[in-house]
Image (cartoon, rainbow, N blue to C red):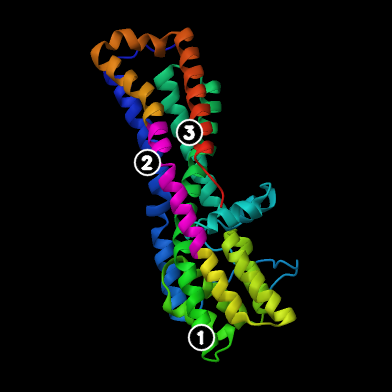
Amino acid sequence: MPLNMTPEVLAGAIFMMALAISLSIGGLVVLLGDDKVRKRRLARAAGLPTMVHTVSRTGRGTLRRDQVEGRFKRVELTLRRLLPSQAALRARLERTGYTISLTRYFVLCVLTALFAAGVVMVMFGLSPPVALMVGGGLGWLIPRMVVGYLAGRRMGQFLQELPDAIDVIVRGLKSGMPVTEMIGTVAKDFEGPVGEEFRRVAASIHIGNPIDEALWETAARIDLPEFNFLAISIGVQRETGGNLTETLRNLSDLLRKRQQMRLKVKALSSEARASAYIVGSLPLIMLALIYALNPEYITKLFVDPRGQMMLGAAFLSQGLGAAVMAKMVKFKI
């Protein structure tokens, strides 16, 4: 039986749902912050980043060790064996820049699902099986969105600094330095995502991997076309020869032009995106206004089965509309 919700109960349920989303967003940053600091300290002390097992573009394994750290090694290894496409998930987690194991990600999904199921059951008066189904969907969606946001933010910072890193390599090549030495220079001089990824490339070269193989390992992990261009340029020059300095200079100009075009598209589509935000937020604003003016009138939507069906259809159409508008203003360059 659905619960007869009072304004206080409804406000508390909305607050708990917002808290669940906040915990999913902040949990991956705050709870994992100590691991990232420890990882940086160990890398600074050893002079090299932590070695992980990867597979090169040619399909051959590298000499790097596959280390499973933490107190739940057996759980981590079990998830690696049972989860489908776990390699893609691990690469997605690595793109965030945090040390997120499959175990921690799985635990976060379960906690988010249970919390969301409890909130939905209290808020809409659903039966436990239905609430668990809804909570399971939210437990899968919210952590995935958080990881995607963290990875996208880090890759955006990487793209902004990549042309400058290529320019450093070009200047070193002009002065007669080898490209491997200049990759180490970029790893030392740059902070943030570019420095971290180039330190991994330098570490892979240091243990004996060819430079093109080390670059393709990083390219497979970060999955950016711009870095693929760099790996292709150096790999082709290594196989066939040619003027690598001129090639990398043209690549740097190309990346800057792509960045400028991306910013131009963002500026031209800003009006459409603002309209999408306004139109998408209007139903929620009207729902809040009606609830503030006449709570008994709007509460029937939450306690009556027909109202719950209408709310479900409304949220579904709202989500489809938001997805369509987001697709319309998003361009690949």
In this view, 170 is above or below 164: below
Residue 114 image offset from top left, x and y in percent:
48, 33
**Which quadrant of the view contains residue 4?**
top left
Chain-order first, disc 2 or disc 3? 2
Count residues near mark 3 (Cα–Cα under 10 Å), then give few for <14, some for 14-19, many for 20+.
Answer: some
Q: How far apart are marks 2 and 1 (CA)?
A: 46 Å
**Disc marking residue 70:** none
Q: Is residue 185 left or right of residue 31?
A: right
The stretch of residues the image draws in magenta is: 256-277
Q: Do the residues labelled 2 and 1 touch (CB within 8 Å)?
A: no
- Kindly tell me whether residue 225 is visible in this rendering: yes
Of badges 3 and 1, the one in the foreground is 1
Look at label 1 and name its amino acid: Gly
Look at label 2 and name its amino acid: Ser
**Which quadrant of the view contains residue 217?**
bottom right
Q: Distance between the residues labelled 3 and 1?
A: 55 Å
In this view, 142 is above or below 190: above
Q: Is residue 41 left or right of residue 246?
A: left
* Residue at the spot of label 2: 22
Look at label 3 and name its amino acid: Leu
User: Going 45% across and 79% down the picture, which residue do you hit?
Assistant: 188
Residue 257 image offset from top left, x and y in percent:
50, 62
User: Going 42% across and 56% down the picture, which residue do you hit?
Assistant: 32
Q: What element carries label 1?
A: helix
Chain-order first, disc 3 or disc 1? 3
Q: Nearer the viewer, residue 298 or 73?
A: 298
**Disc marking residue 172:** 1
Q: What element carries label 2?
A: helix
Magenta span: helix, strand or loop, mainly? Answer: helix
* Residue at the spot of label 3: 114
Q: Are marks 3 and 1 in contact (CB under 8 Å)?
A: no
